[in-house]
Image (cartoon, rainbow, N blue to C red):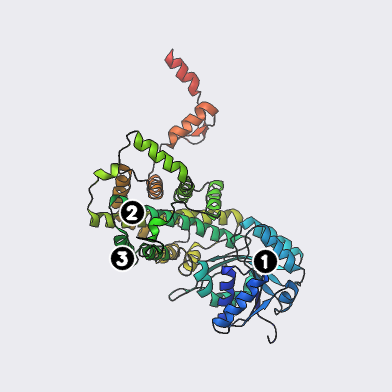
Amino acid sequence: MVGLTRIGLAGLAVMGQNLALNIAEKGFPISVYNRTTSKVDETVERAKQEGNLPLYGFHDPESFVHSIQKPRVIIMLVKAGPPVDQTIKTLSVYLEKGDCIIDGGNEWYENTERREKAMAELGLLYLGMGVSGGEEGARHGPSLMPGGSYEAYKYIEDILLKVAAQVPDSGPCVTYVGKGGSGNFVKMVHNGIEYGDMQLIAEAYDVLKSVGKLSNEELHQVFSEWNKGELLSFLIEITADIFGIKDDKGEGYLVDKVLDKTGMKGTGKWTVQQAAELSIAAPTMASSLDARFLSGLKEERVEAAKIFTSRGFSNILADVAVDKKKLIDDVRQALYASKICSYAQGMNLIRAKSIEKGWGLKLGELARIWKGGCIIRAVFLDRIKKAYDRNPDLANLLVDPEFAKEIIERQSAWRRVVSLAINSGISTPGMSSSLAYFDSYRRERLPANLVQAQRDYFGAHTYERIDVSGSFHTEWFKIAKQSKI
């Protein structure tokens, strides 16, 4: 190794290794460190094999830190929570004023804000940076969402602009998101939207397979076709791929052998909790989380199926005759319309948090950096960016003229799919709750007047009137009692 490296990276699980190799490949010499030293050697070996990349491994934190040029910048890619604090503790001993630490994990945003304050007291800079795109994205170009110290961002902007995914018409998929934990918060909501997207796709699959009786070959063709139009996206592309993969351990297709039990790491749950904290309706994301909880009750569901079948619950599906071509087209439209609602909820959540924290987040710019590299990357995000370009203060994506027109054109198909699913005994919580969200949002008057009257009746919570301003309380109980005499 000649001279000092430009940047360091600590934490060499697959994401860390791949991001380090990506940085090295873009021409930035990088030092790497991991507590388990075998991972360091593995990464150095990969750097040799993948083109003699300028990557240098260190087995101890001191020599690692001292190998980096000043002001030093170190990216950490370790498990969220205590391991991050432990890594900071290990490294900060050797860091000097003006050096910078970047956490690239899926961290709870308040932890990032706490650490940024603690680091500032030591004269160190701190960034919390969301990284999306999985292993492939990390290696060849992720979407990056850095938040925290702007000064720290400027230190490494040149690196991030080259390392991020590059989208021809809109540039590198990175931007300075905002102050504090905003980068982590935005990545968390990205993951919440991802939960919703995956659930909606799973429901489209369920309706096509269970009601439309499509085979895996047909599903592969349908999703491949959808990936050429308005639904063009990473998740639709990988779904098409999944339906084409045969089982290597037996007959048939692998997807049919996968246990119907979905795991999760927590970012989806955090998103729904934050929506509740901020009073933002996020039913699509919430229903996708509920669907994961219910999927986890596999043994209970097996027993429930036996009980209901033995007590005469008929297989409703057997009675439904469908026009396959029409169903495929309807499901495509229902999926797209539901997706608009899901993204509307995510963007509203980001905006509400931005207002609460004074972050000044730019929603159109976030849509732009999600167009490439990340898991929710989709052609559809360009429409979202344009909607916010047209009107940065847009109350809801649903009322953007373009999206409103698209929903109106698709609502009949959407209602047909949800009704067909209900009548066939197929649960579509994501599509149904998205439709309910749309129907509630577009109605001038909701039955909330009755709920507020009930609250005033039993708890004297008062109510407002539509014809006179002010707060009112009625002795409902006394009036009702008198009228019964």
Per the image, label 3 sits on a secondary structure element best described as helix
Looking at the rendered structure, the kind of residue marked 2 is: Ala
Looking at the rendered structure, the kind of residue marked 3 is: Glu
Query: Which of the labelled discs sits on residue 126, or is there none?
Result: 1
Q: Earlier in the sequence, mark 2 or mark 1?
A: 1
Residue at numbered disc 3:
225
At 45% from the left and 54% from the top, the residue drawn is 196
Depth check, front residue: 149 or 400: 149
Q: The N terminus lies in which quarter of the figure?
A: bottom right
Q: Where's residue 35, x and y in %?
A: 69, 68
Q: Determine crowd level at label 3: few under 14, some 14-19, many 20+ residues with C-alpha closer than 10 A.
A: some
Q: Determine crowd level at label 2: few under 14, some 14-19, many 20+ residues with C-alpha closer than 10 A.
A: many
Q: Which mark lies nearer to you, 3 or 1?
A: 3
Residue at numbered disc 2:
334
Residue 173 seen from this side: no
At 22% from the left and 53% from the top, the residue drawn is 323
Give the answer, above or below, for where 179 lies relative to 476: below
Horizontally, is 270 left or right of 283 in the view? right
Give the answer, above or below, for where 38 lies relative to 25: above
At 52% from the left and 31% from the top, the residue drawn is 462
Q: Which mark lies nearer to you, 3 or 2?
A: 3
